[in-house]
Image: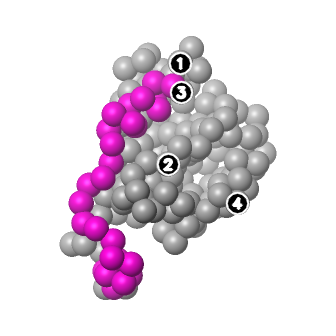
Amino acid sequence: MKVLVVAASRHGSTAEIARAIEVRLRDRRHDVDILEPTAVDTPEGYDAVIIGSAVYAGSWLKVGREFVETNADALSTKRVWLFSSGPLDDTESDAVSADKIDRLTSATGSLGHHVFAGRLDRSELNRAERLLTKIVHAPDGDFRDWDDVTNWADQIADALA
């Protein structure tokens, strides 16, 4: 199967998750392209599309939302999965707004949505982002569960087989 993985990432953490998904799907014998949302002219020519975005204040990054909106018609004819990256601990289980994800799911006909924990390295943040993380007491560290990423990619590979 020809699969497109698209990731909207601000500081690289979500892009690293997308790369891990790409590698796993390649290991499972799928032909995979990985691109940033602005680098995709059209999802035509792909059998499946996996779209992910970093989450800030309960929402996907604008570039991720715009990719879905711009390509909604084409995506509705594909097998689509969505993922979000951002919660840093168990207290942020509602970090992704359910109705916002429902809108993305409806627009794409998504077969599923998965939330992955994120990573916070304050040295990568601008002044406003550092202030916000201090206000909300966001913990520093890499909270991504690579086994979770691999297992989810395997589920998609199995569905495409």
Residue 158 badge = 1
The three-letter amino acid code for the residue at tag 4 is Asp
Secondary structure category for the residue under label 1: helix
**Whole-Å distance between the Cαs marked 2 and 1?**
19 Å
Ranked by sequence position, the earlier of labels 3 and 4 is: 4
Does residue 127 show up?
yes
**Residue hosting label 3:** 156
Q: Residue 58: image x %, image y %? A: 55, 67
Mark 4 burial class by Cα count in 10 Å: few <14, some 14-19, many 20+: few
Residue 128 badge = none
Ranked by sequence position, the earlier of labels 2 and 1 is: 2
Instruction: Please give left or right for residue 141 compared with residue 80 in the image.
Output: left
**Residue hosting label 4:** 99
**Residue hosting label 2:** 115
- Which residue lies at the image location 57% right of the left edge and 65% below the top edge? 59
- Which residue lies at the image location 67% right of the left edge and 35% below the top edge? 111
**Whole-Å distance between the Cαs marked 1 and 4?**
28 Å
Q: Which stretch did the figure color magenta? A: 129-155
The three-letter amino acid code for the residue at tag 2 is Val
Rendered image quadrant of residue 86? bottom left
Q: Residue 9: image x %, image y %? A: 43, 58
> Which sits in the foreground, 78 or 91?
91
The three-letter amino acid code for the residue at tag 1 is Asp
